[in-house]
Amino acid sequence: EVQLVESGGGSVQTGGSLRLSCAASGYTYSSNCIGWFRQAPGKEREGVAALYTSGGTTYYADSVKGRFTISQDNAKNTVYLRMNSLKPEDTAMYSCAADRGDAYSFPPPVASDFNYWGQGTQVTVSS
């Protein structure tokens, strides 16, 4: 049983920062991959950042590289996405996702690799 709940979204101006949180149930840290996706109206769901726990590696989409940072706090069963230097094109619904840990997946993250999803938190960046 895995449950993911996101928080921390909101509205900011260009150049601002937000930190998203994903509170997870116990199986999360048995997962091979924990990641953040986003989807804006009229666009495909995009994997923006992922933590591959089996290899201890991280992935960032080119569009967010250098601005976003994924991290985790095992004691709190929480995964974070720190977003700096936000741009209007970052506006989207952001969702946390995790796999079952029963198979390996590799960068880049794709939606079909993941089994558990949060309900999402909205991020809006104004000009």
Image: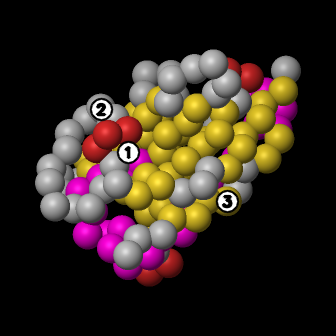
Regarding mark 2 in the picture, which secondary structure is present there? loop
**Residue 94 placement: quadrant:** top right
Residue at the (58%, 64%) spot, across then down: 5
Percent coordinates x, y for residue 51 in the rendering: 34, 50
Residue 36 drawn above or below residue 22: above
Percent coordinates x, y for residue 97 in the rendering: 43, 52
The colour scheme applied to this rendered structure is: secondary structure
Q: Are marks 1 and 2 in contact (CB under 8 Å)?
A: yes
| Residue at the disc numbered 1 | 50
Residue 76 drawn above or below residue 5: below
Left or right, residue 123 beside residue 20: right
Left or right, residue 94 beside residue 47: right
Mark 3 residue type: Ser
Residue at the (70%, 30%) spot, across then down: 91
In the image, which residues are magenta? 12-35
Quarter of the figure with the N terminus: bottom left
| Residue at the disc numbered 3 | 7
Mark 1 residue type: Ala
User: Which residue is at the front of the view, 41 or 82?
Assistant: 41
In the drawing, what numbered circle is on residue 71? none
Q: Is residue 23 visible?
A: yes
Determine if the magenta segment contains residue 22.
yes
Percent coordinates x, y for residue 82 in the rendering: 58, 48
Percent coordinates x, y for residue 65 in the rendering: 46, 29
Mark 2 residue type: Pro
| Residue at the disc numbered 2 | 108
Residue 49 drawn above or below residue 120: above
